[in-house]
Image (cartoon, rainbow, N blue to C red):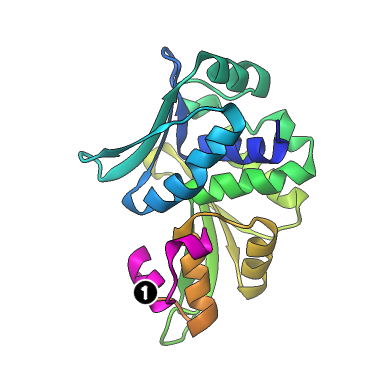
Amino acid sequence: MDLKRLAEFVGIIQGDGNLHKKSNCITIVGSLEDFYYYTIHVIPLITRLFNINPKLRKRNDRNAFYIDFNSKSVITFLSEDIGLVRGNKKSSRIPDLINSNTELIYPFLKGLFDTDGCLKFSKQGNEKNIYPRIQLCFRRTKFAYDVGEILKKISFNYGKWEEDRANGLVFYQISGNNNLEKWFTKIRPSNAVHITKYLFWKKFGYYLPKSSLDSRLKALSLNIDVIS
């Protein structure tokens, strides 16, 4: 098995995924704009790893797309061999497989960021949003603090703060042009939502808040297949 692809999939699960506690179902839930990411990248990744063809569905009640598939062998492997938690992820930790191998931290963070991270741009006193900020936010758990430790291992400087709302949140923010370039070189995100924000900023020198993925593709004169 390709360990880098597996590490990325583990990041995806610990981001927006869930191993059901009682059934053998695995689900990954994202926004409507994750459609391209799911169809072009995540589903082929799952197929290569486990020889399974998961289903993509739309949840109208939540305006979301989600992937699901059933496999007792995959659930057992991920929970018993890798150490992922079934059901509520409150006690989740970054698996030893990732912590013990620096080279696997990068694809793990790729999966985590593609599903649960965001790229923002602030004005910093300018008229336009020019200053990049990579942000990750998690509930206040041991997993949240694990993320800070692996960022240190690969020498990413970050700001961190905590908020008491929603029973406690932990935020990580990696700021600045150099850090953004390093992130896209080392982590290499695959979600078109993040990639088009980055490419728009590279081309125009600023970002348009609340712009849609489709509008960014049009402004960049890109087809989705070009950046997948």
Residue 181 image point, x, y percent: 65, 69
Q: Callout 1, which amino acid? A: Lys
Query: Residue 124 at x, y = what percent?
Result: 49, 80
Whole-percent x and y of residue 14? 53, 35
**Quadrant location of residue 54?**
top left
- In the displayed structure, 148 sits above or below 141; it is below
Position above or below: 80 against 171: above
- Let me know if residue 89 is in the magenta part: no
At label 1, counting other C-alpha atoms closer than 10 Å, the crowd grade (few under 14, some 14-19, many 20 or more) is: few
* Residue 139 at least partly seen: no
Residue under the point 36% across and 54% down = 33
Residue at screen point 56% across, 20% down:
74
Q: Which element type, helix, strand or loop, lies under badge 1?
A: helix
Magenta stretch encompasses residue 218: yes
Residue appearing at x 42%, y 83% in the figure: 128
The answer to whether residue 64 is above or below residue 177 is above
Image quarter for residue 179? bottom right
Which residue in the structure is indicated by mark 1?
Answer: 218
Query: What quarter of the picture does the N terminus occupy?
Result: top right
Q: Between residues 138 and 99, which one lies in front from this camera angle? A: 99
Would residue 119 be seen by someone viewing this image from the given angle? yes
Magenta extent? 209-228
Residue 10: give x, y in percent of width and height: 59, 35
Q: Residue furthest left?
A: 61
The residue at 71%/36% (across/down) is 2
On the picture, is 23 further left or further right than 210?
right
